[in-house]
Amino acid sequence: MLGQHWINQIGNLLMSCFRRLIRNESAATAIEYGLIAAGISVAIIGIVTSIGGQLSTTFTSISTGLSSANGK
């Protein structure tokens, strides 16, 4: 029965830590900032992906123009 006592103590300690974490506003703020950063990252990746094809075409045109102007 002594083992069950220690299991209950550990469970109570974990619940106490979990309650403190939930009440801790700085942890919630850190999570919010993380979600904002993730959203911004997704937006940047989307923009770069959509513009990437256009930039590739533009640089290919510039390269072709410079090569023909250089006589190659």
Image (spheres, helix red, strand yellow):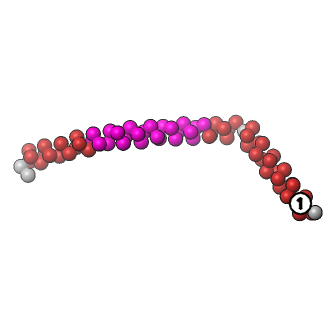
Query: In the figure, is residue 72 to the left or right of 58?
Result: left
x, y percent for residue 20: 77, 42
Query: Residue 7: x and y, percent?
Result: 85, 58
Q: Which residues are magenta?
A: 32-55
Question: Residue 62 lies in what quarter of the image?
Answer: top left
Left or right placement of residue 34 versus residue 50 in this view: right
Q: Secondary structure at mark 1?
A: helix
Against 2, residue 57 (above or below) is: above
Q: Where on the picture, by quarter, is residue 51?
A: top left
Is 7 one of the magenta-colored residues? no
In this view, the residue in front, 55 or 67, is 55
Find residue 60 and report its horizontal and vertical position in percent: 20, 45
Q: Is residue 67 left or right of residue 6?
A: left
Q: Which residue is mark 1?
A: 4
Q: Residue at x 50, y 38 (%)?
A: 39
Q: Is the residue 12 above or below the residue 3 in the image?
A: above
Q: Is residue 34 magenta?
A: yes
Q: Amino acid at mark 1?
A: Gln
